Amino acid sequence: MLEAERHRVIRRLLQERSVVSVADLVDLLDSSEATVRRDINCLAELGQIRRVRGGAESLTPRHETHLIGMPFEMSRAIAAPQKRAIARCAAQLLVDGESIIINGGTTTYAMVEFLQDRNLDILTNSVPIISALVASSRNRVVIPGGTIYREQNIVLSPFDNDTTEHFWGQKLLISCYGINRSGVMEADPLIVQAEMKLLKRADEIIVLADSRKLRQRSSIIVAPLERISTLITDAGATEEELNTFRVAGVKVLIAQTQPEDEALMPEANAGR
């Protein structure tokens, strides 16, 4: 990532989050700690951010609770054509009349376009998916109770007894922070808690993960590979990476991008 792009990401993160640590920036920018510290120093000298111990702070902090990970709108700009291709492939696996669960994420959000003419019962904790499906489809949409986290645009509840406990889905379509031989991984404990509840409410688990996610690591495992039935990824995955999942009994689907995947997503690609 070029310096100007890193600076844009840091400024945007601080608008959303107010305070961000060096460790988070190293992860989100895929840069070294030395590079991140230089970026923070540069932006602080320009008077655009405030340097604090271990990270950076907005000049006008909002001090809201936030989750670990990249904000939804920023994540949409990354691998957008691949995410759209994966979402199209996932939608083709669904059968009208099914009850399904969709977790929050930018890859799962890309499915909305392909669900407009479907007839499904859908439970989702994604605010953008809820809004889009209610506005543009006749699918029956169920939402869990909880708090809306604006950055990731999801609804999370710390309580076990919510709407999720009264819904059963034939399929759970889930995006993730990362996936490898250890299983599906997430970075934030609140997201992990919510996803573990969803995992208990579905027969079949389908993971939507662009090839970058096959190389991302976290310390928190949401589900082992034996719980996963299908992985949908893109052509950027290597055979060595894919064989890890095939050996574990996971069906692997490679979503091929089409010219329209690039052409129809200018707003997402503009920030790449």
Image (tube, rainbow, N blue to C red):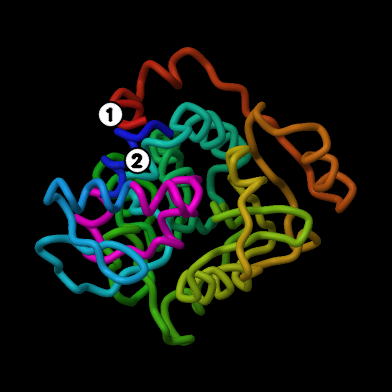
In the image, farthest residue toward the top: 259
Asked if the stretch drawn in magenta spans residue 261, the answer is no
Which image quarter: residue 267? top left
Please report the residue visible at 39 percent of the width from the left and 34 percent of the height from the top: 113
Q: Classify the position of the N terminus by image quarter.
A: top left
Question: Residue 198 at x, y = what percent?
Answer: 55, 69
Q: Nearer the viewer, residue 215 or 42?
A: 42
Query: What secondary structure prevails in the magenta region?
Result: helix
Any mark on residue 6, and which? 2
Q: Amino acid at mark 2?
A: Arg
**Which residue is tagged 1?**
267
Residue 198 placement, left or right of 143 = right
Q: Which mark is residue 130?
A: none
Q: Secondary structure at mark 1?
A: helix
Q: Amino acid at mark 1?
A: Glu
Q: Name the residue: 34% across, 76% down.
A: 145
Q: Could you tell me residue 30's position as x and y percent?
A: 50, 45
Q: Residue at x 30, y 67 (%)?
A: 149
Q: How many marks?
A: 2
Camera-near label (1 vs 2) is 2
Q: Is residue 33 magenta?
A: yes
Q: Tell me the magenta residue range.
A: 11-38
Crowding at dot 2, Cα within 10 Å, few <14 / some 14-19 / many 20+, comes out as: many
